[in-house]
Amino acid sequence: MAMKSLTYFAVLYLLALTLPLAIASDPSPLQDFCVGVNTPANGVFVNGKFCKDPMTVSADDFYFPGLNIAGNVNNAVGSNVTTVNVNNLGGLNTFGISLVRIDYAPNGQNPPHTHPRATEILVVQQGTLLVGFVSSNQDGNRLFAKTLKVGDVFVFPEGLIHFQFNLGHTPAVAIAALSSQNAGVITIANTVFGSNPRIDPNVLARAFQMDPNVVRDLQNRF
Ligand SMILES: *[C@@H]1O[C@H](CO)[C@@H](O)[C@H](O)[C@H]1NC(C)=O
């Protein structure tokens, strides 16, 4: 075989190795659950949202005003999350990204919670925040915490429990981006002690190693 065609095949082979592979897999869930039905007439949602006719799409479909406005932090935890996701900015559909503004009262906190569908990257706009996340059981439930000042950025890995606490005596503000159009949020205390209907207090008493009466008291609060 001629040297020239050998080189030709070698180049083809290398190209085949380096070309990006087309990988087809199921799309990730875009809501908590999406139970299948057999007839479309009985269905309401697809995985995500239905798409608007592209010919009727305008700039306003990609626009959300007002993230300069603080949320009301006059509540039990002293924080407020203003969410910009696919539910109030339809143009985000299928793009795997969303945004929040978080306001904190002095000593307010965004209590321990997790986003089942997103990693979060946060930047402090105003104030000083103690932030942290805890790794999974397999990783030893290690706390990764940091004090952030204006301009500091921190990442909370997908699915891990995290929090932010305003260390200052003045209001604080953060902006965060999330790697889902509908990240979801599970606030630990509300989920565990505020479920509807309630989890049997004996289950939580054993799980949290505390008196069932303390569990009932917590369940009354949430
Ligand atoms: C967050 O702020 C908005 C706007 O002020 C308010 O309508 C909402 O009730 C607040 N949410 C909480 C949990 O306090």
Image: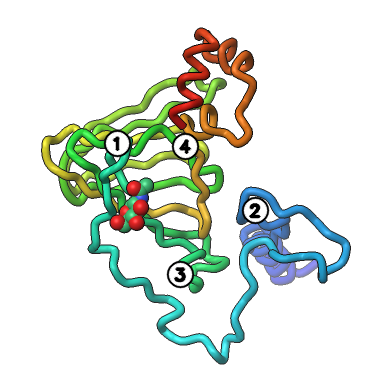
Q: Which residue lies furthest to the bottom in this view?
A: 55
Decide: is 42 above or below 106. Answer: below
Q: What residue type is labelled 2?
A: Ser
Which residue in the protein does label 3 denote?
Answer: 89
- On the image, the x and y values in percent for residue 22 come to 69, 63
Q: Which of marks 2 and 3 is nearer the N terminus?
A: 2
Going from N to C along the chain, the mark reached first, 4 or 3, is 3
Instruction: Give the residue at mark 1.
Output: 109
Residue occupied by mark 4: 187
Q: Give the residue type that dot 1 points to.
A: Gln
Give me the C-alpha separation between circle 3 and circle 1: 26 Å
Among the two numbered marks 4 and 2 on one chain, the one whose residue lies closer to the N terminus: 2
Dot 1 or dot 4, earlier in sequence: 1
Q: What element carries label 3?
A: loop
* Residue plotted at (59% across, 10% down): 206
Identify the residue position indicated by label 2 in the image.
28
Q: Three-letter amino acid code at disc 3?
A: Leu
